[in-house]
Structure formats: C-alpha cells, structure tokens
Amino acid sequence: PEKTGMIDTWLDKHSSIYTAATRHAFVVSIRDGSVDLSSFRTWLGQDYLFVRGFVPFVANVLIRAGKESGESSDMEVVLGGLASLYDEIEWFKREGSKWNVDFSTIVPQKANQEYRRFLEALMSSEVKYAVIMTAFWAIEAVYQESFAHCLEDGNKTPAELTGACHRWGNDGFKQYCLSVKNIAERCLENASSEVLAEAENVLVRVLEHEVAFWEMSRGGN
Ligand code: HMH
C-alpha cells in the first residue's frame, strides 16, 4: 500500500534531525574521501561495543514479535536481523584486526553509554510493541540511509571503507529496513494517541542518539 504512514509524517515533521542523523559530517566525510582515519577507528571500536548491546535489544524485539504481534511473519523479519548480527560481529572483528583496533581495551564513550542505556529502557515490558518496533526501524534505517549515501553516484569513498558502506548500504539491508518499517506502520495504525505520542518521541530520541554517536566518532578519542 502506497499511502503515507505515521513514520513518514514524523520524518517530515522532524526533517532537520533526520537529516542531521543521515547526512552527518562524519558520513559525508566518508563519502567525499576526506574522512580522518582516527575517527573511523574510533567509530569502529565504539560501534562494535554498541552492536554487542544491540543484540539483546533485538532479541527482546524477537520475543515480542512472537508474543505480541498477532502477525506470524514479524518473527521471521526480526530473526533475519538477529541472525545477520552474528555475521556483523564477525565482520567487526576482522575490521578490528585490519585497522589495529583492539576491542578488548576499548571503553564505551559517553554517547555510547547513553545510547545503550536508552535501549535498555526500551526493553521494559511497559514499552508497547509499536513503540519498540518504531525505535528498531529508526536505528537500522539511519545506518542504511547513511551508508547508502556513501555508495551513491559521485562518491569518493576510499576503497578500504567501502566494506563498511556495503554492510549497511546494500539493497538487501534496505529491503529489510522496509519490512521492519511496514511492521511498525501496521502497529501504529491501530495504536492509541498515547502510544502514537510515545512512538514519535522515541523516534526523535533515536535520531538524537545517532547524531551524538556520529559526533563522538568524529571527535576521535
Ligand atoms: C550507532 N546505530 C548505531 N550502530 C549501528 N550498528 C546501528 C545503528 C545499526 O543499524
């Protein structure tokens, strides 16, 4: 169905923070080749820690997809995402050795800690399925939009960084994000005005955390 859902309405309303999250200077610097490699290494180490915290979050979404969704196909979508996080962690480890980033000594920076604390709060059973699904979509979509931008026509992305860009910028990941978005939209269609207000708020907060995460990366150590 090609109708405008809640999420697109909210992205229009909050377009400046959405653009800040998906076209951040750090991402633009990957695309134009001016990226500072120490920033990239900071991002790599911090994102490895983030992803390790994201796994239990997605597992929580998976459990809810089995119990609360009312639509059996939701589980397959989320399970696919969870399974690909296994490959992602392996990819991070290979990149870590390639860039000499020793994950065992990396300490989460403030923006990372705050983002992970936010994810933990979303895992509370008080948070409605529609709300956590909206957050899940936004977390994935920011990376999809950002890294796809680094692969679009006219990019000068350094060859050694295209692996990272393909990881989130590929078409399969884009389709997966659309599937998650459709689940969130379906849940939002039947949500109360309180739940809608909470989902909108959570969406904006995800975007703020993503901006802070890019800022942290750009700042290096
Ligand atoms: C900070 N946001 C951050 N890291 C990630 N790996 C993702 C989102 C995945 O989409």
Image (tube, rainbow, N blue to C red):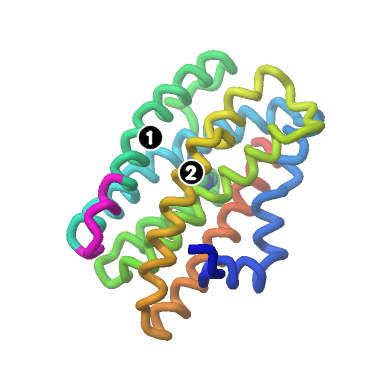
Q: Disc 1 vs disc 2: which is toward the camera? A: 2
Relative image position of residue 126 (x, y in whole percent) = 28, 72
Q: Secondary structure at mark 1?
A: helix
Amino acid identity at mark 1: Leu
Q: Which residues are magenta?
A: 68-76
* Residue holding disc 1: 85
Residue at 79% x, 27% y is: 156
- Decide: is 193 above or below 205: below
Amino acid identity at mark 2: Gln
Extreme residue in the bottom direction: 193
For disc 1, the neighbor class at 10 Å (few under 14, some 14 to 19, many from 20) is: some
Relative image position of residue 172 (x, y in whole percent) = 48, 36
Q: Secondary structure at mark 2?
A: helix
Q: Is residue 115 visible?
A: yes
- Decide: is 202 above or below 180: below
For disc 2, the neighbor class at 10 Å (few under 14, some 14 to 19, many from 20) is: few
* Residue holding disc 2: 175
